[in-house]
Amino acid sequence: MKCGEIVIVGGGCYGTFYARQLTIAKSKGKAEFDRLLIVDRDAGCQMLRELGEAPDRRLVVSDWDAFFDEYLGRSASGAPVENHIVPSPLMPHLMYGWVLRRARARWPGRLVETRALPGKTGTPYDTAAPDGTRYLSHADWLCPTHCIEPALCPVTRAPRTWEMSETLTDLARRLDVQGPAVFMCEHRVFGVGSFSVTEVMAGEALVAEAGATGEPVDVLVGTVSSCHGAANLLHLGRG
C-alpha cells in the first residue's frame, strides 16, 4: 500500500486497530504513507490513549461531516488526491452525505433529496435505516471481525461467488437510474481496507454529469466492500 495521507474514520476500537495495523505495516515495509489522520469528536479517544500521536500519526478532533467538507473540498479544488479513506463498519454513509451536500451547493435552487430505493435488492440482508440508507450484505451469517473477504469465504468454506459492486451495477440497471457511483473498500494490508479519494471525486463528478442536463434524474450511490454495502438514491429535480 502506497499513498500520501490515510484518513481513518473514528478513534474507537476499530480506528485504533486500523491505526495500529498500518503503523506495523509501515515498520515492516508493507505500507508507505506520509501520515495517518484519525478523525474523532473525542479529544481523549481510545486511539490517543493507546497509541498516542507521532510524527506520522495525528488525531483530528472534528465532526466527520465537517471534516470531509473541508478535506474533500480541498481535493476537489485541485489538491493531491492519492490519499485513502479507511471507513468504520459502524459509521453512517458519510461519502453519500458529502455527495449530497455538494449537489445542494452546486444547484441551490434545485430539488436535491434522498429517495427510498424501491423494491428489494436481492441480497440476503437488506434493511433500511431511518435516514433512507439501505444496508446490504451477501452474508446471512455473522462474519468474522476484520474479515478481509478472501476468495474463499471463511464461514461457508466455499468460493465467494458475489461482488457487491456488481450487485449495485445490476440494481442501477433494473431501476433504470444513473450510476452507480461506487466507493469500493478493498483490503490493502494487515486487515485494513480503504478506498481512494480519487474514487470519491469520480463519484461526485458522475453526479455532476448526471445533473448537467437539468432534467430530473436519480443516481445510485454506494459505499461497498465485496460482501457488504450502504446505498442511497440521490434525486435531482428539474434544474
Image: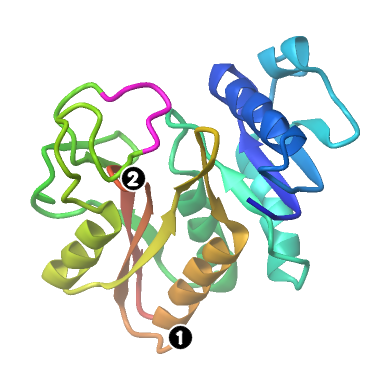
Q: Is residue 46 magenta?
A: no
Magenta-colored span: 143-148
Colour scheme of this structure image?
Answer: rainbow
| Dominant SS in magenta | loop
Residue displayed at 40% across by 36% down: 148
From the top left corner, tell me how far across and down residue 61 is, in percent.
Answer: 76, 29
Q: Is residue 25 left or right of residue 204?
A: right
Q: Is residue 147 magenta?
A: yes
- Total marks shown come to 2
- At label 1, counting other C-alpha atoms closer than 10 Å, the crowd grade (few under 14, some 14-19, many 20 or more) is few
Residue farthest to the right, as pictured: 55
Task: Please give the residue where the numbered disc 2 appears in the rendered image.
Answer: 230
Residue displayed at 11% across by 38% down: 124
Q: Which amino acid does the dot numbered 2 rest on?
A: Ala
Residue 239 can be seen in this image: no
Task: Please give the residue where the numbered disc 1 appears in the rendered image.
Answer: 212
Q: Is residue 33 left or right of residue 116?
A: right
| Nearest to the observer: residue 212 or residue 112 | 212
Instruction: Answer above or below: position of 119 versus 112.
Output: above
Q: Considering the numbered disc 2 on the image, is that residue within a helix, a strand or a loop?
A: strand
> Which numbered mark, 1 or 2, is in the foreground of this view?
2
From the top left corner, tell me how far across and down residue 163 is, in percent.
Answer: 25, 53
Q: Which amino acid does the dot numbered 1 rest on?
A: Ala
Residue 94 can be seen in this image: yes
Question: Picture quarter containing residue 105?
Answer: bottom right
